[in-house]
Amino acid sequence: MENAAIELKNITKRFGKVVANNNVSLSVQKGEILSLLGENGSGKTTLMNMISGIYFPDEGSIFIDGKEVVIRSPKDAFKYKIGMIHQHFKLVDVFSAAQNIILGYEDGESYNIKKVEEKVKEICDKYGFDINPKKKIYEMSVSEKQTVEILKVLYRGANILILDEPTAVLTPQETVKLFAILKKMKEDGKAIIIITHKLHEVLAISDKVTVLRKGEFIATVNTKDTNESELTEMMVGKKISLNIERNEPENTEKRLEIKNINCINREGVKLLDNISFIAQSGEILGIAGIAGSGQRELLEAIAGLQKLDSGEILYYNPKTGEIDNLVGKTPLQIRDLGVRLSFVPEDRLGMGLVGNMDIVDNMMLRSYRKGKTAFLERKEPKDLADTIIDRLKVVTPSTATPVRRLSGGNVQKVLVGREIAAAPTVLMAAYPVRGLDINSSYAIYNLLNEQKANGVAVIFVGEDLDVLIELCDKILVIGAGKITGIVDGRTATKEEIGLLMTKTDKIGGAENE
Amino acid sequence: MINTIFAFLNAAIIQGIPLLYGAVGEIITEKSGNLNLGIPGIMYVGGISGIIGGYLYEHSTSNMNPFLGILIPFLSCLLGSALIALIYCFLTITLRANQNVTGLALTTFGVGLGNFFGGSLLSFFGETGSISLYKTGGYFKAALPFYKNLGLFGETFLSFGFLAYLAILVAIVSNIVLKKTRVGLNLRAVGENPATADAAGISVTKYKYLSTLVGGMIAGLGGLYFVMDYTAGAWTNNGFGDRGWLAIAIVIFAIWKPASAIFSSFIFGGLYIICVYIPGLSSSAKELIKMLPYLVTIIVLILISMRKKRENQPPESLGLSYFREER
Amino acid sequence: MNSKTEHIKEPLFHITKRDQMIWYKQWIIRTIAILAALVVSGIVIMVLTKYNPLKVYAEMFKGSFGSSRKTWILLQNLAMLLCISLAVTPAFKMKFWNLGAEGQVLVGGLASAACMFYFKDSLPNAVLILIMLVGSIAAGIIWGVIPALFKAKWNTNESLFTLMMNYIAIQLVSFFIMVWVPSGSSVMGVINQSSEAGWLPIVFDQKYFLNILIVALLTAAMFVYLKYSKQGYEISVVGESQNTARYIGIDVKKVIIRTMVISGGVCGLAGFLLVSGTNHTISKELAGGMGFTAIMVSWLAKFNPVLMVITSFLIVFLQRGAGEIATAFRLNESVADILTGIILFFIIGCEFFINYKINFKKHKEVK
């Protein structure tokens, strides 16, 4: 048999005590597309970073065309014609597409940007890309930036392409376009690895699938011999029945009413497109959608952090019975209206908490203004910290430990604990279990359920459809800033939601036409 | 009147040359993302290193060779500036120290070095008085022989020593390198987005070191021009004044473009001494006029921040050290 | 690295960020750095002067503490540097690079000098001093808040802005000296020499006592402000993460401006103390580079006002001591700057070993 374009044998990588990859092996032939499948945190990206020279494996070996190689830096990776397209684009904003493409590439020719531009055009024509090589990156849409990344590795004559979740940021049409291009590359003899956790894409594009789970190698199967439920089982280990408890909502009443809100960014893209819904007390409202479809903007708009172009956000005060419009108000003004709104943001250490401060000082973030004097009152926050550590079983040396030093799950418990302690009437949580282990995740689900039982209107933004279906009473699906559907959590199916997520009329605005 | 204007233009250029060296040196440094506030100190060191080289040569032989008389101070200037710039490099790049603090410390250190040797060089050799290398200064001041035939034009624009022309050449070459070469592209990438440059296989450390060293050496030449040409081989403590900070101001004024720095430097040089050429100014009004360069810089700084044109912004990672494994 | 590189499977060592190091280890590293710096400085002194460095250090010590007068001068210099360091600290904690302390001190001093010059002894001394105090603080605030306004509104680069403001302040001072001194000399004599109007009173027979007392109180106040006040807490949050600040409803722009009001105001106070309590005159060199040194003092002390007493002492001791040895050994006084530079480099450099860990890897051979 022909030598594999690239083969990994028994790769192990540890970060401190955490084993990111344990004894993983895979191989890709020329003219073949391999999907690397796994949930968030299963070690897919770490593995690929070792091929592209960003990390160095602790154990194991890498073979290119049957020869063992050592890849110590991105430069070494180029040498072996390996190109990685990262999830977070590595582009210089003030450079043009062509400048980014040639950056760091020593082709032995003298530097001439005109020639580069011409060559880029040639590659575009060959594979069907549509891009202006002179355009500056900061003027580009996400999909254009991704195109530049792909062109960058093709320009270097890469034979092995690694794409890290390439469709996460794309609209469905753009995804279709990308897949067509990938197929052309495959016909051209390239070996392609796609990192993903979307099953339908795996089935649509790849020849082989390698599945990772929590850093462990599970199996490699041929795509044509497998199906969605088999892959899912390999990915999550067992048929997914999460057994999250869900009680019937009690005493529901209108708490928050969103009416036709719109938000347009500087480039004219509609981040929120005429969104309307109602969040009721004693209910968990789930929000599903591809990452970056407007979930963040929606929550931040409710919290008073995102300016809106039009629309109303009405809060029905359970104490006074008054109705207040929150649009155009700052977080402080919202609080002063007596709106008890808690918000667990997606970016825990960059927004919800201050990493370098200790747990007590982080407890104060919400409450430090209490008291009439100009000085801080640390007694209550200290008690709260102790309570949360005790109740939520936060593992920490003491309350004086900077939260940056806690593990992901414990960080999240501190954050959620603080937000719940404010006795909210509305609780918003964005991806609250991302990166958490199973136990921590269930601890968070229980907390949300507890809040629901207390009559709080809970808004839960999630990515795992199984969780959404088992936890939420209602699920709102958004795609590209628009509501594409609202389903009942008790009757909805994953397929139904998946379909709504990728429903694609008029997505992306004028830029992608 | 015409004569005054030409004399002013001539003086503006003379004042502008050391600023131009400083500004170009700082632009090249900043393009790599290093905000080197040690440039004023480096310029002092450049000057004194040249003086030391010249002094040692002038005192080792009675029969001076003009070529060596220029080469030795020139090389010792480059060496001195490179060595002190190396301190900055090592601290900020290898040890990832805070750039502002390191730069300010370097300026303290460099100005101190300059003044220390300037004040005690002679006493090391058992002499007294102040340093005056008029022979070496003479070599540096030697102008094109035919400029006198060109009348007022020649007097105004061609009466300089070679370092003046070299300054303009360095600025133009730097501009070409930054804009039109692979090295320039890589360097700019390092300053804009080091993580991207790193991922593209460019050695961030190497580029930061190189550009800071080269930038320091260029800035050092500004000090050399000042002591050899402007003051004709004489050293006065603190004589160079705050020109180093003015050079940093020009970087902003020229919006990080070496070619624009040429005219900017002459404008700033002009503003620096214009008070002498405006007749009838009181001595207090002169002091107010001297504010102009700084005031203009602030206005430019505000304008570029208001307009937010991406090409005109400082390099994006300016002032930050790069650590690959930073989360 | 070396010719054996290809046999080594991975780089010789790699650097990782440390979790927080235990405080006493941090101070051990810093002490080692200072000792190393003293050794290097000793070598430099020996090379330059051929004197025994120990003798030189002894002389430095004598120069700083040799007499009660010298000790008081040292304490006075310490107080002034500390005062300016305290001034820049809240801004730095907020990650606002105020490189303009020099100018803020100058305009503060200028305001005091102007009051002394124009009011002469026409007002009761206590009233005059009060006017001077208010005027100085106001002037410092104006100088500090201008860059802050632009930072808040357009995110204008504050380090370059404040840097330029220094030179405008210097020219402003030069301008007024030219206006005030009839002879056209650029040096202003002592103002109100005979009436001593606007001079801070001498307490306990010590000219500098009041200055030192005020700065001591200020140090305590700043410590409490940063650590225990709500505003201090807001400064920390904004400095750590503007996103978090927004999230909890802190008005970031307001905090930036308010903090620069404090920073500029304390600088103005320093200017007042220098003019009214120390020099009784104004010159371009009023701040004498302390605006920049203060930045290093504050940074070295990790923005902790109490530690700043130690770091500013270290620097003042060096400068005073070096100044004394310069006279004693007939050296150029710039030796002080060189020694300060060397010490700073070592302390700046040693932070690396506190924040990062160097991991040496065992070599593995490829078969």
Image (cartoon, coloured by chain):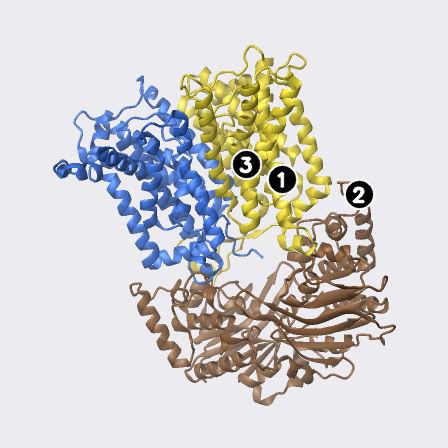
Chain colours: A brown, B blue, C yellow
Q: Is residue A477 left or right of residue B258?
A: right
What is the secondary structure assignment of the residue under circle 1?
A: helix
From the image, tell me which residue sits under label 3: C143
Residue matched to label 2: A372
The amino acid type found where label 2 is placed reads: Lys
> Residue at horizontal 24%, vertical 42%?
B165
Q: Please name the amino acid that badge 1 sits on.
A: Pro
**Distance between the alpha carbons at the discs numbered 3 and 1:** 16 Å
Q: Can you say whether B11 is above or below A215 in the image?
A: above
Camera-side residue of B116 and B159? B159
Q: Residues within 10 Å of mark 2 (few under 14, many from 20)?
A: few
Q: Dot 3 falls on which chain?
A: C
Q: Name the foreground residue: A187 vs C38.
A: A187
* Residue A489: mark in rendering: none
Mark 1 or 2: the one toward you: 2
Left or right of residue B102: residue A378:
right
Of circles 3 and 1, the one toward us is 3
Position above or below: B36 against B198: above
Q: Residue furthest bottom?
A: A225
